[in-house]
Amino acid sequence: MMRNIGRMTVLMLVLTLIAPFVAYHLASGAAIGALEGQLQRSLVLTNRAIATEIERFRYLPLVIGEDARIRALAARERSQAALEAANLYLQTVVKQAGAAELYILDERGIALAASNFATPESFVGHDYSFRPYFQDALLTGEGRYYAIGVTTKKPGYFLTSRIDVPGRAPIVVVVKADLLPLETAWKAAGVLTAIADRWGIVFLSGDPDWKYRPLAGLSDEAVERLQQERTYDGANLAATKPILPEGVTLPRGQADAPALHVEEGGQQLLAKFSLVEPDGWLVLAATSTADTGKVAGFWALAALIAGLVSTGTLYFLHQRALLIRIRLRQGEILERKVAERTQDLAREIDMRKRTEDELRRAQEGLVHSAKMAALGRMSTAIVHEVSQPLAALEATLATAGLLAEKEGAKKVGERLLDARSLVKRMQRTVKHLKTFGRKGASDLEPVCVDAVVRNALDLAAPRAKTLGLAPTLEADGPSPLVTAVAVRLEQVMLNLILNALDAVEGRKSPSVTIRRAMEAGRVSVTVVDNGSGIAPEHRDRIAEPFFTTKLTGEGLGLGLSIATAIVQEFGGEITFAEAPGGGTMATVSMPAGERPSQSLEAAQ
């Protein structure tokens, strides 16, 4: 059974690969056939529209020729009154009938009267004997011809009738019909329809690019004839590219010519023709074949999907039989894998916990190391700060001893008060150092921002004195509270202040200012210096671990990296910008107000 299903699956796969090509071919043929039927119906409607538009004026020349004012022009001698009466009559008929123009030619082809006699483009006096419609009217009694007017430069369809007056020379009545409304309708409808004359030159078209272009290459005879008759006066027909491919023969005399495939304007078109008699015109209707490819592709895709679904169904049945047997053996294997994976996950969880503990201890060690590094950077200034009170204390006590020997109790008391103030000064310095250097604080608590800044300023005071400046604090309003660890926040402020002091070292007028402000529920502390500033190429890297611009031995490049991490733990951020007039602005921004008390480890 399984072997039979496998063979059927292979057979269906082969059929699936063949089916799309067959479906594409059949669907493409059906789509082309549908387009041909659509084009044929369009041609029928177009032929009727052309015949209707022409037949409106077919008998107008004969009717006009029966009027006495027109027949009077057949006399050899024509009075001015007769000419004016004919002109006015033709002008009135044009307005009523809707023709483009009406005019009368004598036996030589000279215009005697015209409906446009009062315009600058008047036909009166012009010679039109070269026009075929005049020659045909003299020979056969009527004529018809489409051309561009040599006087008005406007195209039109000319219908003529010869009027015979007994005993006088014949005259020819010409009506010019405007067929451009057909072209306008085709353009508005977006229909690719065109009319070509007996030489194959398109004179009306819904596509402006086709107008006055030959369907096929023109012969020398056709070019010469068109030049003589001035059919398309002003158009360079010989230089235009034919619409149909080279080698295609125009379907003249064929009642039902096959459709042609034409490439025009980068798209593939299907074109069909029909004849319009008695002028020998060709009516061309075309449409794009782009959708036929889409339709054929859809059916090819549908055939492919159907084949794949059928093949997949058979393959599914084949695989299902195999899976039923395999799954019977998978239970035990799966249980063993789950147990092994559970043990692996337990080991991974334990390893991750140990790794997190080690990382936390390493982070705390780095923070403490950074604090010790900051104290190390200030060691010289701190020793100087403590050694001065000690020397003064020694001198004060010696003086007090001498005064005691001389029994100057009052002066001894004053010296002892001086000694006590010196001891308090050393105690305050040592207290700040002890508080800053301790390692265990990690509970989040409400912290007074101004107090933190002042403690950091006290710690940095010895370093500032060595540079001959005193950093100032500019506070806006009462001191706000933030939720943080006071010692760690103090470490951040001290690091920024020390960096500012390092930046102004060697400047003529060093200045370091700390500004505290409150805006939109956030507290910002900005340390501004007038140092050399941060180089543009270093601005994006200053918070990277181990990145430093100091000389070897002056720093490890961890201060700003650790400070940034500490502020981020408190929900804040540190930004750096160029200060006005030069220097650097380092801003610590944190949410204002108290948050629920929790340990730093829990907050992480």
Image: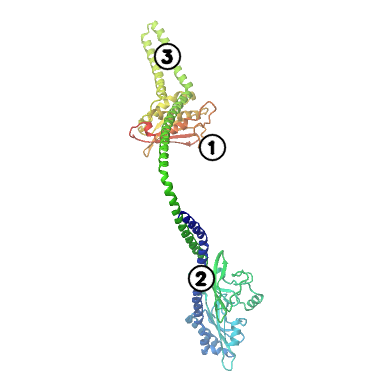
Q: Give the Cα separation between the discs numbered 3 and 2.
A: 116 Å
Marks 3/1: CA distance?
51 Å
Q: Which residue is mark 1?
A: 537
As helix, strand or loop, the secondary structure at mark 3 comes to helix
Mark toward the start of the polypeptide (3 vs 1): 3
- The residue beneath circle 3 is 393
Determine the CA span between mark 2 and mark 1. Answer: 70 Å
Q: Position of residue 345 (x, y in %)?
A: 41, 36
Q: Compared with residue 483, is residue 295 higher up or lower down, i.e. above or below?
A: below
Of residue 332 and residue 597, the one placed in the foreground of this image is: 332
Mark 2 highlights which residue?
Answer: 33
Residue 125: percent from the left, percent from the top?
A: 59, 82
Q: Earlier in the sequence, mark 2 or mark 1?
A: 2
Q: Earlier in the sequence, mark 3 or mark 2?
A: 2
Q: Neighbour class for label 2 at 10 Å: few (<14), some, many (≥20)?
A: few
Q: Amino acid at mark 3?
A: Leu
Q: Quadrant of residue 406?
A: top left
Q: Amino acid at mark 2?
A: Gly
Element marked by disc 1: helix
Residue 569 in the image, given as x and y percentages of width and height: 40, 34
Front disc: 3 or 1:
1
Asked whether the viewer can see residue 120, the reply is: no
Q: Residue 478 appears at what percent x and percent y?
A: 35, 32
What residue sits 54% from the left and 68% below the top?
Answer: 269
**Residue neighbourhood size for the residue with mark 1, other residues' Cα within 10 Å, grouped as few (<14), some (14–19), many (≥20):** few
Q: Nearer the viewer, mark 3 or mark 2?
A: 2
| Mark in the foreground, 2 or 1 | 2
